[in-house]
Amino acid sequence: MPEGFRNADKELHGLAKKPGHQPRQGYSLIELLGEAEGSWGCPSDHCNPQSRGWQRCKDRLNSLAISVMNQWPGVKLRVTEGWDEDGHHSEESLHYEGRAVDITTSDRDRNKYGMLARLAVEAGFDWVYYESKAHIHCSVKSEHSAAAKTGGCFPGRALATLEDGAQTPLWALRPGQRVLAMDGAGRPTYSDFLAFLDKEPRALTTFHVIETREPPRRLVLTPTHLLFVAENASVPAARFRPIFASLVQPGHFVLVVAGGRSLQPAEVVRVWERRDVGAYAPLTRHGTLVVDGVVASCFALVQEQQLAQLAFWPLRLYHSLVGWPGVQGDGVHWYSGLLYRLGRLLLPPDSFHPLGLSQVES
């Protein structure tokens, strides 16, 4: 398999067979030239917030189309098959879910297909391979599965504050740097950055944006991430409780940095979604981190800050004994993945964010 291809979990190979399963009627993408816009169709009765793999596929097509035009001026992306409305694929095919496409270049030059496949991987497709000599097959995970894979993250360009007061984007953090965080007593402190629990530089991710006023702050994070929240401004910082970002609503209060290093509550006035490239989940020794001026947890998927901090004690001890590792590769940290699998065995299902369960149940 050429370099740049990558596998994905079993979910990508197809849907579970169900009695009486019939291919979904949809729109077929016969040919798409340009920026992968306009011709992408999805029946309204199948495009619901719980099943938006079609949107993830479209977003990756848009990104890939731009990459193709940059790589080969004058050449455009060509999609030969998207939604299958004629039942030409097997029952398990993701073409019936709007999560798979077959692609070539507009000039049909097969010498370009190797690079095209690599560009597809870089655009964020979860499964890319030569299905035939005539085209390359690409597909994506469901929206829920992708959210579970990346867990709780921030965009790479979000800012952390170093001990010298300088700000640095999360993607540039290096093990051993000390960043502004919050200790167990609700006080600001500087904490060692240990590693990324997840690192997906090219992932196109759906984030929650939480905006405050007095002082104004804007935090961007995934819906499964934990954020410290209170019902009113009189609650001491140590009593702010961790909840999933997807549960934060206008009227809640979060902790923000103001007046140098002091922490104060700020009212949430607006919450919305946006997509951004890059997903990073930094881990600090204290299990907290100030991101874009807002105090957040380092943990996600399970709504138990103290349990998560305790579970990562062996990893903190390891770093204390052996020092800092070299350059960390992309993807989920092996220890984080191990804890998730153990948690699924030991904790009740309602301990997890619903997006965290879908990956296991798929």
Image (spheres, rainbow, N blue to C red):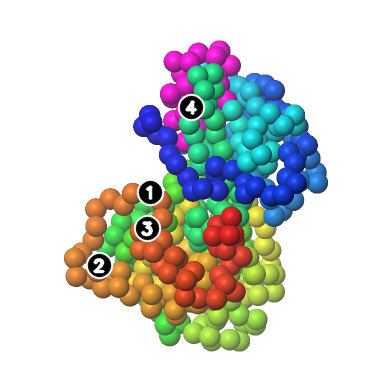
Task: Determine the residue positioned at 54% across, 30% down.
Answer: 137
Q: Residue 130: which numbered mark, if any? A: 4
- From the top left corner, tell me how far across and down residue 48 is, in percent: 74, 51
Res. 290 visible in picture: no
What residue type is disc 3 on?
A: His
Label count reads 4
Disc 3: CA contacts within 10 A as few (<14), some (14-19) or many (>=20): some
Name the front one of labels 2 and 4: 4
What residue type is disc 2 on?
A: His
Quickly name the residue at label 2. 319
What residue type is disc 1 on?
A: Asp
Q: Residue 330: which numbered mark, if any? A: 1
Quickly name the residue at label 3. 333
Task: Determine the residue positioned at 41% across, 51% down.
Answer: 331
Q: Is residue 9 above or below residue 338?
A: above
Residue 102 found in image quarter: top right
- From the top left corner, tell me how far across and down residue 66 is, in percent: 55, 28
Tell me which numbered mark, 4 or 3, is placed earlier along the sequence: 4
Front residue (pair 329, 264): 329
Q: Is residue 306 above or below residue 208?
A: below
Tell me which numbered mark, 1 or 4, is placed earlier along the sequence: 4
Kindly state the secondary structure of the residue where label 1 is placed. loop
